[in-house]
Image (cartoon, helix red, strand yellow):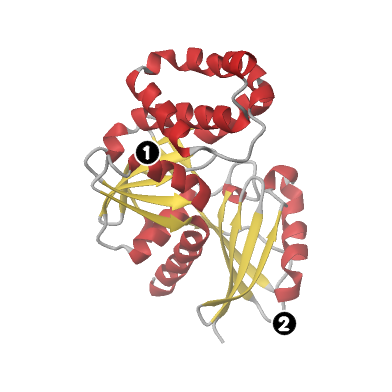
Amino acid sequence: MNRWIAVDWGTSFFRAYLIENDFVSDKIETNDGMKFLQQKEFENKFINLIQKWLVKNQKIEVLASGMLGARQGWMEAPYETTPCNLNNLNYVSPLINDNRLSLKIFSGVSQYNPPDVMRGEETQVAGFFNKNKNFRGSICLPGTHSKWLKVKNNFIEKFKTYMTGELFQVISENTVLLHSLNSEKIEKNEFLKSANKIFQNPENLTNALFQIRADDLINSMGPVIYKSRLSGYLLGIELLGAKDFWENCDVALIGSKKVMDLYENLLEDKVLSLKKFSAEEMVLQGLKSFRKNLMKS
């Protein structure tokens, strides 16, 4: 039986998949993100998490990506620099005391001018390439640090990162606006109207942000409206900055459905074509493609 483990270990989460004959036969998902661990703790934590998959006197191959390869992670996997071909991504192999497994941690990608980095997203992009070999255009990976990439012929040519998700969290939890945003919902029309407001007058962003609180005090339209406005303002300013990535382009979105739907609402009438892909599925496809390339070499 062809049996191995795929791992996506991020800052705040851990996901592992047992692959048997190219199918996921089991999955482990926890909140044991690498931000909660010291370097010396990674090996024991990892073995404890996947213990049920380990077999005595049998070594299983583990391929991993994500923040465990960062400088503060298990072992730093040096960045590949753009432009780069993800078929030839480098990896590092930490020395592991447990002889039931071997581990390869794949590199992230960096860019010198302008300076930028990604770690984990490149695996999703590799998974996308695995299923869309002839795609030429832009890929957007919405999230805490949203990424926009120009790609062609399985190469990442350049990319830009926007702190949209993190800014949303910081503003929602640490500014005066926290009193106005207690909702899980987004109202589509209010969201679109707010994004277009920033498209037309981006210089008024910080004023528009304060108006959220002022309008709540004066008109009390409810947290759904104000959360929709904040989402529209921040996504609007991101898309303005990333305009050369999506204008007159074919665009692929990779992420969670909820967030991708917001991007789709804004982009669908502004791009040549738009397709959406699950981040989890693209990570799996990416690690599978890395393994296939290793077996060829």
User: Where is the C terminus found, in terms of image quarters?
Assistant: bottom left
Query: Furthest-bottom residue in view?
Result: 1
Q: Position of residue 51 (x, y in %)?
A: 76, 70
User: Where is the N terminus found, in terms of image quarters?
Assistant: bottom right
**Residue visible at 59% across and 47% down?**
67
Q: Earlier in the sequence, mark 1 or mark 2?
A: 2
Packing grade of label 2 (10 A; few <14, some 14-19, many >=20) is few
Q: Classify 32 as above or below 149.
A: below
**Residue visible at 62% across and 40% down?**
184
Report the amino acid beneath label 2: Asn
Front one among 131 and 198: 198
Q: Position of residue 20 (x, y in %)?
A: 57, 80
Q: Position of residue 126 (x, y in %)?
A: 40, 58
Give the label, 1 or 2, closer to the camera. 1
Judge left or right: residue 229 versus residue 35. Answer: left
Where residue 202 sits, quadrant-wise, is top left
Judge left or right: residue 295 versus residue 170. Answer: left
Q: Disc 2 designates what residue? A: 57
Front one among 219 and 261: 219
Front one among 53 and 207: 207
Q: Name the mark on residue 266.
A: 1
Where residue 210 sits, quadrant-wise, is top right
Q: Classify 117 as above or below 201.
A: below
Q: Classify 150 as above or below 106.
A: above
Dots 1, 2 in contact, CB < 8 A: no
Q: Position of residue 267 (x, y in %)?
A: 34, 41
Packing grade of label 1 (10 A; few <14, some 14-19, many >=20) is many
**Residue visible at 36% across and 28% down?**
241
SS label for mark 2: loop
Q: Is residue 256 visible?
A: no
Report the amino acid beneath label 1: Leu
SS label for mark 1: helix
